[in-house]
Image (spheres, rainbow, N blue to C red):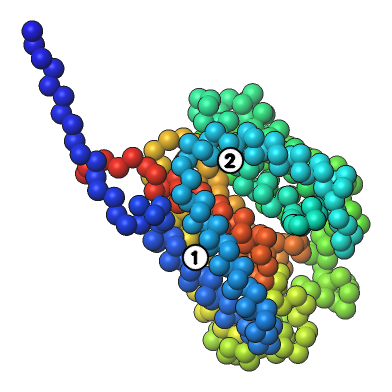
Amino acid sequence: MNSVIRHTYPAAPKSMWQRIHLDPVLLSGLVLLAGIGLAILYSATDGNVKLVYNQMIRMGIAFGVMTGVAQIHPRSFYRWSPYLYGIGILLLIAVLVFGDVGKGARRWLDLGIVRFQPSEFVKIFTPMLVARFLAQHPLPPQPRTLALAGLFVLLPVLLIAKQPDLGTAILVAAAGSAVVFFSGISWRILGGLIGAVLAALPVLWTQLHDYQRDRILMFLNPEQDPLGRGYHTIQAKIAIGSGGVWGKGWMAGTQAHLEFLPEPHTDFIFAVLAEEYGLLGALSLLILYLAIIARGLLMALQAQDTFSRLLCAGLTLTFFVYVFVNVGMVIGLLPVVGVPLPLISYGGTSMVTLMAGFGIMMSLHTHRKLVPS
């Protein structure tokens, strides 16, 4: 009887970073970005040590969440995604019924011991479910598959827009749509979807709140109300332009320190950086963002299964949309919406969910099966 000889090869040895499930390249970029953010925040707040200290604590929590999430095996994300998505939808409905009202919007749930914004978690749960759903079907997806995936994205977007929270709705739509885009959708179908969105714009316009329509009109012509609704955009442009090529120097900006620039430590902090560090400083920050995005896309390309590839690419593109929308808003290329600049703007909830997304990406990347080269 002929015996079958089976050759077994030892698995490639794991590095220290693979054992703790962190990607050193991506982690280095995020740590550098956080350090830059603290320096800019200190200047934007006129040396307010308390706010900087609070931000350091939030960054510590965010990096801790990222590290913890990175230890979870990708199989768990795949298995839990329908339940997490369902919980997210129920929480969004609860916000509309029981949520706290603040500044004219109902976005928060107060459970007594904790107060949180469920829409932030949906930024993660939606692309996770869409990636699982598309991974279960042949790619490129057929029209019926695309329609169902679109419904998974549209439902949370409508619930968030109802709060109203246009900025978060845009981010959730981008997160889900990014997964669909990377699934290999044909250009013909993509063109049809873009055409459908453009055709629906008049209807969407009628559904916007008055202040949201005002923001769009001010984006088109902020000079029509320079001391009112167009004030934010005009002052941000002045700050950016006054920085020139080299900038005025750290703590030497006038627009923020003389209180001309609104929200200098949150949504408009990019204008503070551009005024103090000039064109070269702003470009350096954007190059760092692009390096992080490039690393995320490379991790997606190296994924060994469809779910991991789609989810990693979707989360990376979501990060890109954060940066694109915030910078575009500050320089006057997009309407003003409440989207922070990642790891630079002051805030906690959005940063934690963003870093949780990076933790998922690191888990998908470091739990790959290693084979000898």
What residue lies at 71% left-to-right and 69% top-to-bottom? 267
Choose between 339 and 247: the one closer to the eye: 339
Estimate the x, y position of residue 37 in percent, counting from the top left. Answer: 58, 74
Residue 146 appears in view: yes
The image quadrant of residue 244 is bottom right
Residue 272 appears in view: no
Q: Relative to residue 33, is residue 315 depicted above or below?
A: above
Choose between 305 and 370: the one closer to the eye: 370
Of the residues under marks 1 and 2, which one precedes in the sequence? 1
Estimate the x, y position of residue 225 in percent, counting from the top left. Answer: 88, 73
Q: Relative to residue 217, is residue 121 depicted above or below?
A: above
Tag 1 residue = 30
Tag 2 residue = 128
Secondary-structure class at tag 1: helix
Estimate the x, y position of residue 332 in percent, counting from the top left. Answer: 72, 68
What residue lies at 62% left-to-right and 55% top-to-bottom? 353
Q: Quadrant of the C terminus?
A: top left
The image quadrant of residue 143 is top right
Give amino acid for label 2.
Answer: Met
Q: Residues within 10 Å of mark 2 (few under 14, many from 20)?
A: many
Choose between 54 and 133: the one closer to the eye: 54
What residue lies at 67% left-to-right and 28% top-to-bottom? 148
What residue lies at 71% left-to-right and 33% top-to-bottom? 151
